[in-house]
Amino acid sequence: MTRRKTIVLVALLLAIYQVALAEHTRLRPRVVNGLPSTSFPQVGAVLFVSSVERGERLYTTCTGTLIGCSTVLTAAHCVCPDWVDSAADCDTLGVADPAGIFMFFQHAGYLPVESVVVHPGYQLGVASDLAILKLAVPASGFPPLPTNEVASPAPGTVGIIVGFGITSDDEYRPGVKRYGSVVTAQCAGLVPDNTHVCWDFLAPIGAPGDDSNTCHGDSGGPLFSSVEGQPVLAGVTSGGSGTCGAGSASFDVDVYFDREWIRNEAGADLGGERCGDLAQVGESGTMVASVADGSLSAWEPEGELTIEVRENTVLLRVTLNGQDANDLYGLGFPQGNDFDLYVRVGEQPIEEGFDCVDPTMGTYGLCEIDFPDPGTWHVTANRFVGQGAFRLTAVAFSRAPPARCVGDCDGNGDVTVDELLTMVNIALGSASVLGCGSGGINGNGEIMVDEIMTAVSRALEGCT
């Protein structure tokens, strides 16, 4: 080989190396080593329909968090064309059609998206990688999560990351919710510190899901943290560099930095203590059963779950989610999975006998039964094609108890003059607060003047 050819070859190899290095270090939209979970009901998967016209397969693209009963916060790059990294380019090339997007929550099922708004200041790795999804049908049965309105989390703050993404940069198998622990840190020049929240790969030793990181499919998911003692949604997963494993860097958009835009876009729907008139998940009026860690294959084609339904149940909601794809033969070519959901009361459901079935193509399913018969309900996840992890979640809801009317001391639905006098005596200290347990609205063990005035209004206008 001549010296000239050697120089050309070395230059070519150097160019190839530089391209590979640039690709490796490029900021990329993308819970590794996390623990599977059916908790965090407000965290859902952002699903795209493979064909809007034909309504085909639902597949996982990102993660989102319910911040209002009809409002989901996710990442802007999740609803922009691939490799578009700014709001301007996203607007030019087109935001995703909301008709082809669904949110999936394990405790609510599919919820169609009505509209999509991208933050006008979005620039990946610079600021504001955020989008608001407005739901056509509001969520019900669990409350939205509060967003951070206090202060940016300081470095060294312990947080929880949650997402429906993959567990390895080498395979694409999203669709299972996982969570893990992280510790916030300086961004070290990767992205601006004032617009982002970064973290160390290593969490406190012994923390649940430590050594966790985000990966593809976790984009748009939450970083939960405690800011000045208040648990809040502090970050939205945006991207990272390198692989998803140890030593790689990840970053979230700082929710506090973009709080005004979030507040304006969410409007009056932001926050709230409950969604719908059902008892909320975690309250005494709900019963939850789940399979948090299961797998389906040709050798184990079914997964099972049972839930005991009580007489006062008004809705039984059952969901299925699982890994979208598998690499069955280890060739690096993901194949789509297809799992089906069956529900039946009293005995195990079969293909010829069931009370509800969802055979939707893909690995997601929903069954809702109004006023279900009391007793044991059986749930089955059935493998139709492929193999992979799955999760079953069943929730039996009762109606939320009606709020007691201020001043209605005996709970009969009316406020009388005698009850108003009782409240006045309690406020003066001449009677025990136990004489009108529903008189106060502040829960402070006292009757205040403003509460008496509210009770007077209820006496005049009625308890409605």
Image: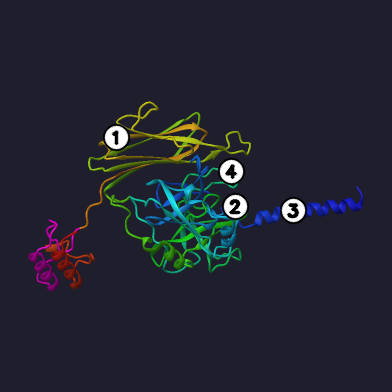
What secondary structure is found at the residue carrying circle 4? Answer: loop
Residue drawn at x 34%, y 50% is: 140
Please report the bounds of the magenta region as a residue range: 404-432
Q: Is residue 389 above or below residue 226?
A: above
Residue 400: x and y, percent? 25, 51
Question: For the point 14% across and 57% down, which residue is it?
Answer: 413
Does residue 100 show up?
Answer: yes
Any part of residue 249 in sight: no
Q: Give SS at disc 1.
A: strand
| Residue marked by disc 4 | 171
Q: Position of residue 178 (x, y in %)?
A: 47, 48
Of badges 3 and 2, nearer the viewer stands 2
Which of the marked residues, 1 or 2, is nearer the chain's N terminus? 2
Q: Which x, y percent locates residue 282?
A: 32, 51
Q: Compare marks 4 and 2 and give the one earlier in the sequence.
A: 2
- Residue pointed to by mark 1: 376
